[in-house]
């Protein structure tokens, strides 16, 4: 089965390519490298022994995307391509709406032209608005989102759901990620955000490797055990395996199904710092800073549905997430550069 990964050279996409390949799937990658690095393809070949067909294109460019489908018999698509920085989306909302929604509309139109009926979409727990009670469950009401990035994910979920309703033999699986962290056990691929990381673990790993002086802990006055924010961190390899399960499910079903991909456990900022210190073997200096605009105290998944229906559950512990993150960062202090 040939699977197209849009944004497949990115953090989640590249790890998913490894897991799909290990399960015997043929992978094709389309990526414009706006937030990823071409060198990832060489790393993937080292890990898997396979050279994946690569198309350096903007997925919104239908003529370019049509060529991918003309040259490869694509039976399913995992749609990772899209901008994903929450803070940036607040500053440049139009480019987020234009890019994330255009790529999706172009993709579905081309899939229809070629009769490709299986789509897995990379969504996010950010679609659960402030009203949602914990732990977040798939049947809960979504929104209002706290940033344009989150709204694009919610709008795309709606686009896909409506399209699947109008085309009963179409099969869509929407995956709501919680907080992906860690790296492939080889240390050859990992998280390499552009500029100063917004997210906690890549920031901690840059402090651990000496590229940043200390971590700012955004608030220690939340109503949590130690006052710092609690999140559901999931190892990127567990997340990638969830995509393989989703592809298998999509091929056997039709309609739209939504799954949380999380551990169901909450870890605080300071607990993550402690776990990382264990992994890297030295102290992670930090300072308590004011709360970050838009942050919430708790966010974690009800992960039952993915286990009951996909037979998928997470296997890696927080210590293993930090171990693998450190293995990547210490071997690649400047990421892929
Ligand atoms: C985690 C915790 C911060 C950085 C975001 C997106 C979400 C998803 C995952 C794409 C919070 C604290 C962080 C730092 C800190 N992305 N923190 N110092 O905000 O839960 O989710 O990334 O789908 O859509 O919203 O993740 O890693 O930014 O923050 O104290 O330098 O770490 O306050 O409690 P978040 P995060």
Image (cartoon, grey):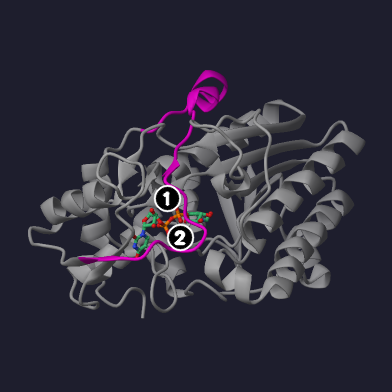
| The residue stretch that appears in magenta | 287-314
Q: In this image, 184 relative to 284: left or right?
A: right
Q: Is residue 186 visible?
A: no
Q: Is residue 52 visible?
A: yes
Q: Identify the disc placed on residue 237.
A: none
Q: Residue at x 31, y 42 (%)?
A: 267
Q: How many marks?
A: 2
Q: Quadrant of residue 8?
A: bottom right
Residue at the extreme top of the image, as rendered: 308
Q: Are marks 1 and 2 in contact (CB under 8 Å)?
A: yes
Look at the picture and state if 58 lies above or below 166: below
Q: Residue at x 67, y 40 (%)?
A: 142
Indicate which disc, 1 or 2, sits on the residue closer to the N terminus.
2
Look at the picture and state if 337 lies above or below 8: below
Mark 1 residue crowding within 10 angstroms, few (<14) / some (14–19) / many (20+): many
Tell me the residue that label 1 is attached to: 180
Residue 245 in the image: state x and y as whole percent: 54, 33
Distance in Å between CA atoms under marks 1 and 2: 9 Å
Look at the picture and state if 301 lies above or below 56: above
Would you say the beta carbon of the disc 2 residue lies within 8 angstroms of ligand 1?
no
Would you say the beta carbon of the disc 1 residue lies within 8 angstroms of ligand 1?
yes
Q: Secondary structure at mark 1?
A: strand
For this rendering, which residue is in front, 286 or 272? Answer: 286
């Amino acid at each position: 089965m040939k699977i197209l990964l849009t944004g497949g050279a990115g953090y989640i996409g590249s790890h998913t390519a490894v897991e799909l390949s290990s399960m015997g799937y043929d992978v094709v990658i389309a990526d414009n490298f706006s937030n990823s690095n071409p060198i990832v393809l060489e790393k993937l070949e080292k890990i898997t022994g396979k050279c994946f067909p690569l198309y350096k294109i903007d997925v919104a460019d239908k003529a370019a995307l049509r060529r991918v489908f003309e040259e490869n018999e694509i039976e399913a698509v995992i749609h990772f391509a899209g901008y994903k920085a929450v803070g940036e989306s607040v500053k440049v909302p139009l480019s987020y709406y234009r890019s994330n929604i255009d790529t999706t509309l172009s993709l579905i139109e081309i899939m229809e032209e070629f009769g490709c009926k299986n789509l897995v979409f990379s969504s996010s727990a950010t679609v659960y608005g402030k009203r949602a009670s914990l732990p977040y469950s798939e049947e809960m009401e979504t929104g209002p989102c706290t940033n344009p990035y989150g709204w694009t994910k919610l709008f795309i979920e709606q686009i896909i759901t409506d399209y699947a309703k109008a085309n009963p033999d179409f099969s869509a699986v929407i995956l709501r990620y919680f907080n992906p962290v860690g790296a492939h056990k080889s240390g050859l691929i990992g998280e390499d955000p552009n500029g100063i990381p917004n997210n906690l673990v890549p920031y901690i790993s840059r402090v651990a490797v000496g590229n940043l002086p200390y971590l700012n802990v955004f608030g220690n006055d939340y109503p949590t055990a130690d006052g710092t924010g609690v999140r559901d961190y999931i190892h990127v390899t567990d997340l990638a395996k969830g995509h393989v399960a989703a592809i298998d499910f999509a091929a056997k079903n039709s309609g739209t199904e939504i799954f949380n991909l999380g551990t169901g456990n909450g870890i605080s900022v300071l607990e993550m710092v402690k776990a990382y210190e264990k992994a890297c073997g030295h102290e992670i200096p930090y300072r308590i800073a004011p709360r970050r605009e838009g942050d919430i105290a708790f966010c974690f998944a009800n992960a039952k549905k993915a286990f009951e229906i996909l037979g998928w559950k997470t296997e890696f512990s927080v210590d293993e997430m930090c171990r693998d993150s450190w293995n990547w960062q210490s071997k690649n202090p400047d990421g892929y550069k």
